[in-house]
Image: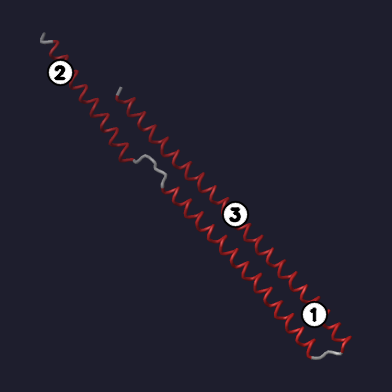
Amino acid sequence: MAGLSIMATLQAHKEGVKAAENQSEALSKAEDMRQADLSRQMEQQNAAAADEMHAAHKAALADMATLDTISGEYGGGNTVSRGRSVQQLQQDENLATVNANNRNAMAEIGQASIASRQNALSQIKAITAPSKVGTMLQIGTQAMGAYNQSQQQSKLDKMASQGKA
């Protein structure tokens, strides 16, 4: 009887360890998928920012061409030079804004990545598997209980054979 109890304890230990390993592996795979998604978001953000910068630059070139046309028609002068300066300043401000927005978005995605990784590590560390020491103590307790029961039964059998029961 004690042997069966000990075997059941060993089997429960093995199953507990396997369950903890499976849970840890599932959390790791889920985190890898989240990190891949965040990486994809970073790539999309960079592509969107590049497209926006390209569009802003293209618009600025068109505006400069318009100013050049006006300059050609009116013969140039301070007004055209001032217009070109203002246009260049606006283009620089637009590009700086796009750049700042991209940096902020990338920083936000980066922070989300760090937070997700920390959360996953925390969850993985919180997984508890049965300890070998605990299992051995449980087996020792079971063996001791079986021994005590055997000793008690021997005493009862001895008393019964002597007619004292």
Q: What amino acid type is highlighted by mark number 1?
A: Met
Q: Where is residue 49 in the image (x, y as percent from the top left)?
A: 68, 66
At mark 1, the secondary structure is: helix
Quarter-of-image position of residue 90 = bottom right
Mark 3 vs mark 2: which is more N-terminal? Answer: 3
The answer to which of 69 and 143 lies nearer the viewer is: 69
Q: Name the residue under label 3.
A: 36
Q: Do the residues labelled 2 and 1 touch (CB within 8 Å)?
A: no
Q: Seen in the image, is 7 located left or right of residue 79? A: left
What residue do we see at 70% from left, 80% from top?
A: 89
* Nearest to viewer (mark 3 / mark 1): 1
Q: What element carries label 3?
A: helix
Is 137 situated above or below 91?
A: above
Amino acid carrying mark 2 in the image: Lys
Rendered image quadrant of residue 45: bottom right
Q: Which of 89 and 47 is in front in this view?
A: 89
- Label 1 belongs to which residue? 64
**Residue 82 percent coordinates (x, y):** 75, 86
Give the residue at the far top of this rendering.
163
Mark 2 lies on a secondary structure that is helix
Q: Where is residue 36 in the image (x, y as percent from the top left)?
A: 59, 54
Please report the residue visible at 33 percent of the width from the left and 26 percent of the height from the top: 5
> Which residue is identified by label 2?
155
Taking depth in this image into account, of 114 and 25 the one nearest to the observer is 114
Q: In this view, does 19 lie above or below 43?
A: above
Total number of numbered discs in the rendering: 3
Characterize the local packing of mark 3: few (<14), some (14-19) or many (20 or more) Cα atoms within 10 angstroms. few
The CA span between labels 2 and 1 is 109 Å
